[in-house]
Amino acid sequence: MPKIQARNVDDAIYENIVRSATKNERTIEGEIRFTLNKVYGSTVVAKSQSEKWVRDISERLNILITNLQEDKFFRLGQKFNPITFAMTIGEEDPTTILNAFEGTATPSFKLIETIAKHLECSAHWLLTGEGPKFLISDLGSDYREMFKAYMDKESGKLLSGYEFNFIRITGNDHHDGTLLIIIKNPDGYLGYYESCRFNFAPDGVGGTGRANLESFLKFVKLYIGNTAIKSYLYRDVKAFSNDLTTHHPCAYLNDHRNLDKNPWLIDILDGVEPKGFEFTEKEILTKMQKIKWGNYETRLSMLNN
């Protein structure tokens, strides 16, 4: 690659470069290179497919960090530090990470997969720019198998260290009533959403949707049990959730200004009107009253069937 040398740089400009490099945890050379890529990268025609791919990876990595920072993914509001991150993922040479973020060297598939695992994003998105960025998937009709993956087959209880967080999104025209399930474990977060088959819409659901909703609630009451359920209402006043996959799942649990802990799901499963919104499916409430909470034997039989 060609080199650039610049003499007689204004002292104030140089000091600004030093401050920016320190702030962004980069060398002065790395800061200048990053700025040149940012300012001129979009106008430069790549000499090869590989150069373009390296630049695209760098751009997506930097977008990812910005998104994670906004979603409060890093503990206590800490800023992403590529050197510390390199140590965390077991990289012997931090320049491997720095080069990937600055777009100055080709990252290996293994490195991209490792970064995706630790930053809880999609490796496919990092590699290609296609598909959802974060690990939020449509729950779909196979929700039983999804839940079973987090339950102990001998005891029927939730695996140690896991949490089920049921969030009803409200105040968003596109996703009003959408059910978002965030599974939290010691290693991170996964998210699943359902906005059609059994959502909790303010105006109710159709015939097929009602049957699906009833089946889902029955499964949750018999199989999961009230001790494993944490439910919330998320007031999405700024259309934050128009595309659920653009945010890390932790963004919802960390947004304490708009997230309210609310026993609405336990209420519905007990067959009573939930607190915080009107549940229009009164027939389902009546049926839920007649179903007993699942016990040890019930959960074991459902696990093994």
Image: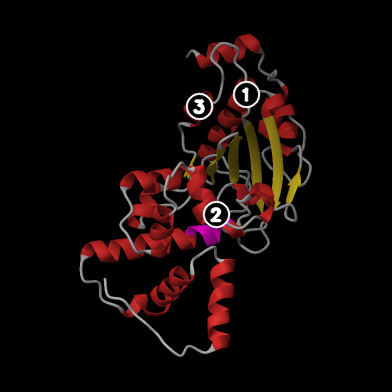
Cα separation, mark 1 vs mark 3, equals 19 Å
Q: Is residue 119 above or below residue 147?
A: below
User: Label 1: which residue?
Assistant: 160
**Secondary structure beneath disc 3?**
helix
Task: Using the rendered view, name the quadrant where residue 296 is placed.
Answer: top right
Q: Amino acid at mark 2?
A: His
**Secondary structure beneath disc 1?**
loop
Cα separation, mark 2 vs mark 1, equals 26 Å
Residue 172 image offset from top left, x and y in percent: 63, 58
Residue 87 image offset from top left, x and y in percent: 50, 45
Give the mark nearest the N terminus, 2 or 1: 1
Between disc 2 and disc 1, the foreground one is 1
Give the mark nearest the N terminus, 1 or 3: 3
Q: Is residue 38 above or below residue 256?
A: below
Magenta-drawn segment: 64-68
User: Label 2: which residue?
Assistant: 247
The answer to whether residue 120 is seen in the rendering is no
Residue 295 image offset from top left, x and y in percent: 67, 13
**Secondary structure beneath disc 2?**
loop
